[in-house]
Amino acid sequence: MTATHTTERAVIAKRVDSGTADTEEIRDLARAAGYEVVGEITQTRTEDPAYHLGEGKVTRLSNVVAREGAAVVIFDNTLGPYQTYNIGNELPERVRVIDRFRLILEIFGQRAQTRKAQLQVELAELRYELPRAEAKASLAKRDERPGFMGLGEYDESREEDIKKQISNIRDELESIEETERHRREQRRESGFDLVALAGYTNAGKSTLLRRLADDLDVDENDDLHPDLDTTAESEDRLFTTLGTTTRRAKVGKREVLVTDTVGFIQDLPHWLVESFKSTLGSVYHADLVLLVVDISESVEEIREKLVTSHDTLYERNEAPIVTVLNKTDMVDDEEVQRKTDALSSLAPNPVAVSAKQGLKIDDLADRIDHELPDYERERLVLPMTDDTMSLVSWIHDHASVETVDYGDQVVIEFEARPAIIEQSRAKAGDLVGASA
């Protein structure tokens, strides 16, 4: 995994086709990766095929890097392999050039804790590197071997190594996904509804997860689900959640498992989204998705993020989606209403909350209860045996029991997920058959 750059000084570079370049997000990303931002160069112009920036601007960039003693240049753009090589050759010796997506991969590498997350980072890094290895092969054939400053040294066997590694990682990820699919089915059979949190990085998903599951103890369910987390990070920084974090919550009569997932990021390339697609399995296979957005942002920003989120979710998701307008503590009621009205076509009937302050969380819980698949009612008449007492205990653990009458027979009435109803009927059938 990539090491944290706690002391490296960085210069930001960004080109836009028109308007003024905004560097706030790339500065946040750089800081999240551990860099110290010491300068920036921006330019408004069409892309230069050789240098991305204009050649004169690259010279100016080199001067800023030398003056500030920077070790790295971070572009808030996508750089092609040859552009990276050309820019690197114009900079002081041993200065690295990375683009926006290489930076995001560094952050992911630093935050990856689980085997699955580490594999996904490695897969994304290899997909990023593959076209660069191909470019190095092309340059080597022309005896223009790039050095450390550009693309790195050329290794003739590297292309095939990358392709083989990609194949191996895909196989291992598929095995992990199969295990997770089995776990999801076990949880449904245990009576849980599955709720997934989705949305952009820093929208407040982790804070909302903590709020929904605030007073519940995971330990009591540890034997069935040892992977459940007792906590979830909740910090004002990018990418605090890279893998998935799952906690239990009680919503009305329901036992719910709520999963926080990796945040979406603007302008992600297809290969990077593909690498992390298995992380979104928790979203694609949920019973309900809560799409969390930051209502303190502008209507234009929220609209753009909602469109991108919907594109990602509707590709494979079949569950209902409820939009949660978070951070209402940062805006007044009038602004909440104005933005709700403006976004109604993309987010009909949203729920506005403040996860940080716990405002309207009860309203959200009611909405979750309403949107999840309906419970079915059941009434079982069972023989009075020791095995019946075990079944009654099992139903208490997996359903919402309304009444139990003990007489010559045991009559139990309850509500539960359809899968639990089916299991209880099968178990009851076995009991009745055994006592006949």
Image: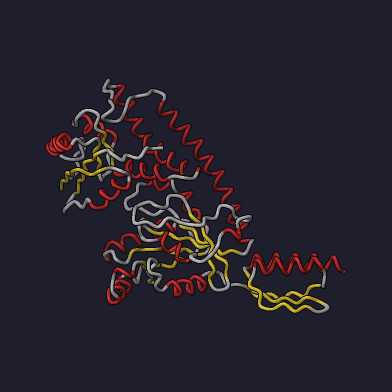
Farthest right residue in view: 436
**Residue 150 versus residue 206: which sits nearer the camera?**
206
Farthest top residue in view: 143
**Residue 147 versus residue 219: which sits nearer the camera?**
219
Q: Residue at x 83, y 78 (%)?
A: 408
Residue 405, image x and y in percent?
75, 79
- Name the quadrant containing residue 9: top left
Any part of residue 265 in sight: yes
Horizontal side, residue 251 vs residue 241: left or right: right
Q: Residue at x 80, y 79 (%)?
A: 407
- Name the quadrant containing residue 351: bottom left
Instruction: For the N terminus, give its image quadrant.
Output: top left
Horizontal side, residue 89 vs residue 176: left or right: left
Any part of residue 284 in sight: no
Residue 178, image x and y in percent?
58, 48
Residue 7, image x and y in percent?
28, 39
- Name the quadrant containing residue 434: bottom right
Horizontal side, residue 90 vs residue 345: left or right: left
Q: Residue at x 38, y 66 (%)?
A: 356
Residue 256, image x and y in percent?
55, 65
